[in-house]
Amino acid sequence: MTPAGPILDHHCHLDVDTGMGLAAVDRFVAAGGTHLIIINKPSWHLGPLPTTADAFTAVFERTIAIIDAAAERLPGTAWGCLGVHPACITQLVDKGGLAPAAAAELMCAGLDRAAARVGSDRIIGIKSGRPHYDVDAAVWEASNAVLQHALALAAATDCAIQLHTEAADALPDVAAWADQAGIDPARVVKHFAGGAFTGRLTPSVISRRDALTRACDRGIPFLMETDFIDDPDRPGAVLGLRTVPRRVRWLIDAGHADAMHTAHVTLPRAIYGIDTTGTLS
Ligand SMILES: [Zn+2]
């Protein structure tokens, strides 16, 4: 691949109300980026705590409008994954006063709404996971039930799923649940992965130089992301949207053109069924 080929940031968020919004897309394009997979922001960042599945639907509709607007500014296009952030359970239990099982039930209803949008309006996958911080046993158990529900939805919908989980170099329990649910673990993506992730899930590596170098040296297929959150209150909390195109050029110069073709062409097609070359004008 030459740097003129597709460059996909596989996991980012845009906030057109309080963040940079579409201006961040323009910066991504100016840096050489071509395609985005945009994830809805956690619902409680955009309004009150959800109390019904309709609250999730409202967030999804806003996200789809943002994806449409972003797509118009890209030389490639934009797609999205919709879901329920795993930290939602802590919000619902600690601030909303719900029992863990009731919180999980509401989150599963939100995921049902997300899965219903897959295949239309540019939505190509589901987003789920489990807390990346310490929680009590009841919350952990309920979170794993939500995650397994999301895997079952991905299997039934025949779509990919992105997972936000604890930092780990493998998630064998999740891979086993994917098998049980009937979804290929390779279509289950560990979002915000480090460069040492192994196992049967696909890593989406956070685009820091050290993580990318480690991933390239190990020769395991990976996607690239920034997890740009577009939150003006947390500048620098994650990487900016120009990072992936810059790192792609840096890695190609370092001799990793094959890994970049895998990250930006082959894996997106294999995991999501999307065509990053055919959609590039
Ligand atoms: Zn994210």
Image (cartoon, rainbow, N blue to C red):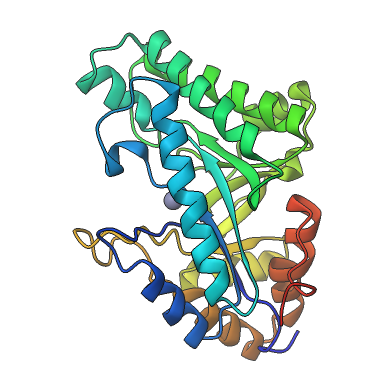
Can you say whether 95 is above or below 233 in the image? above
Residue at position x 43%, y 57% in the image = 13
**In the rendered view, does 24 fall on the left or right side of 232?**
right
Question: Residue 129 at x, y = what percent?
Answer: 51, 34
Residue at position x 64%, y 53% in the image = 122
Can you say whether 232 is above or below 278 in the image? above
Question: Residue 213 at x, y = what percent?
Answer: 57, 72
The residue nearer to you, when weighing 80 against 103, is 80
Q: In the rendered view of the protein, which quadrant contains the C terminus?
A: bottom right
**In the rendered view, does 196 fall on the left or right side of 56?**
right
Can you say whether 251 is above or below 104 in the image? below
Residue 85 seen in the figure: no
Residue at position x 76%, y 21% in the image = 180
Residue at position x 62%, y 52% in the image = 203
Q: In the rendered view of the protein, which quadrant contains the N terminus?
A: bottom right
Residue 105 seen in the figure: yes
The residue nearer to you, when weighing 199 against 77, is 77
- Count of marks, rendered view: 0
Question: Residue 133 at x, y = what percent?
Answer: 34, 34
Can you say whether 93 is above or below 176 in the image? above
The residue nearer to you, when weighing 64 against 26, is 64
Question: Residue 200 at x, y = what percent?
Answer: 73, 42
**In the rendered view, does 141 fall on the left or right side of 274?**
left
Q: Quadrant of residue 163?
A: top right
